[in-house]
Image: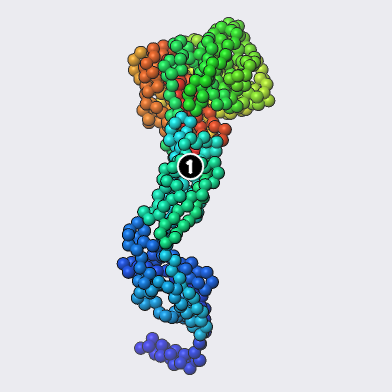
Amino acid sequence: MKILFTVSIIAVLLGCEKPDYITPNDQTDILKVYASVEDEPAKETFSSRIVGDTIFLDVDYYYPINSDNEVDLSKLLLYAQIPQNAKITPALRGFTDLSSPIKVKITGGGGSDKEYIIKANKRGNTDVLSAKLEFDDINGDVVESTAIIIGNDLNFSVVPGTIMRNPRVTYSLNRHAQGSFVNGSTVNLDQPLTFTVTSVGNAKKDYTMKVVEAKKLPRGIREGSAKVMFAKRMKGDLGITTENLASGLALSGKYLVVNIAGQRSIYLDALTGQKVGDVDLSISGVLHNNNVTSDDAGNILVCNYSWGGGDVFKVYKKSSVSGALEPFISAPLFNSFGEKISVAGDITKDAIITSPLVGIGESNWFARWQVKNGVVVSQDPEVVNLSPSYKWNWSNADVIHTSPTDIAASYYVTGYSTNRLAKINGSTNGLLEQNTALDLNFISNSVDYMEFNNAKFVTYNYVNSQPWGSADQVFLLNAESPLVGNPSTRSSLGLIWSPAAGLYGAAAAGGSYNSSGKGDVIMGVSENGYYMYLYFMFTNGYVVGVQFDCVDL
């Protein structure tokens, strides 16, 4: 009772007040007009464009687009969004006949009005549903780029500098439309190309086809982008008939050098693997041109094999495959060096060069030279002791720094019979981490490190020196992942790519077994920064080039 009484008093009091009148909305601008067909009432099947006091309703000639159902303009369901308190006349009830333009009037809540003309524009659909550019690369492989369709632009994303052979475009339209050239035709996209789509009802739309620069991922390589560019048999394809002497790789410009110890070496097209010519890497000394490598700028380093006991270890440099050999390092050393040589950086600027001590039953020493402003700081190397972090046997080891300037930065080592990839603290030479040991019947003896597209990568090999069994693999790893697991069983954390065991070894190439146990890995980056390359070889087996990219698709 108490609540009812209170409400009654309030009602009486309110009844004595003067009412507030709200001024009606007097707006007359039409907000939106669309139409639908009888089978789909209220759906925005056909939209419109409002230009001043004219409303153009875009109606497809056929609906659905790929059907033969011609749209009847006299049987459209028309809808309009108008301001609050406004009304439209004539009222849009039932079918509206738009075979001819019609007039409608919007009357605002205050009495103002505005007239519009609604015109139906019935034409065939000229949308490009999809388009794809295909071309052959320099290896003859088909490369595809799907068009990014933005308005009237058909943009094909292609890496700068790409050579497009026999470019052709395929496209998808509705069944009533036609393109200005035959589907799958060869096209010239050196300049933007106009592509016209026509359809029934005098419909016509011009598009611009053009090649645009591909975008990069913010970091790392694109998953699944690994592509074997070539795999060449040393004997059958490259004519290397001397067995067990192919020892190392160098990357210089557009060429890949394959060193043949003690003999004239060869160089290949780094993208196709085709042999281009011979290159003289001969230097004086015992076992001259025993091995090679190259720096980040494509300078080639050639080293001999020194037996120790005062024998001189020599390194020569060569700016290109056609450049002259120039003395670079000459150092009498206490033991054997020169089975492997690695470099981080650019020897014309700053670099760190390393070569492991070999030739004895067990070793954990390597020689290191620093290069500053293109000059070797000291011909006498710093000899670094890894004990007890890591050790190797006889001639099977390799060391690569991660910095061209900072000897305190971490470095990687691999060697037999430890057969692990290890990361070493450059300040203490202590072990930071290492992965699981590979089968000791085979050999790990080459490593390389590369930074590409804001990410870090490391690779190492696994060589079969036996007439039986299966190894001959390389492993590309994310250098920012922990070294955990066994990459040969694909249980390694951070493993990016590896070929099947034995696929590129001597047995697969039909050569004699690799009794020398030699093999090499080296990585490089394309000038445009879109591609990372991994090259590897197994003596008496194959020389292989693999491409990775960072293209954001």
Residue 226 image-quadrant placement = top left
Residue 373 image-quadrant placement = top right
Q: Can residue 430 be spotted in the picture?
A: no
Q: Is residue 276 placed above or below 286 in the rendered structure?
A: below
- Nearest the viewer among 328 and 18 is 328
Question: Residue 513 placed where, x, y %?
Answer: 39, 13
Question: Residue 380 placed where, x, y %?
Answer: 64, 14
Residue at x-position 48% and y-position 81%? 107
Residue at x-position 43% and y-position 15%? 235
Question: Residue 144 placed where, x, y %?
Answer: 44, 40
Residue wearing tag 1: 187
Label 1, secondary structure: give it: loop
Residue 411 image-quadrant placement = top right
Crowding near the residue tagged with mark 1, few <14, some 14–19, many ≥20 C-alpha atoms within 10 Å: few
27 lies left or right of 405:
left
- Nearest the viewer among 426 and 224 is 224
* Amino acid at dot 1: Val
- Nearest the viewer among 539 and 393 is 539
Residue at the left extreme, as displayed: 39
Residue at x-position 58% and y-position 6%? 309
190 lies left or right of 240:
right
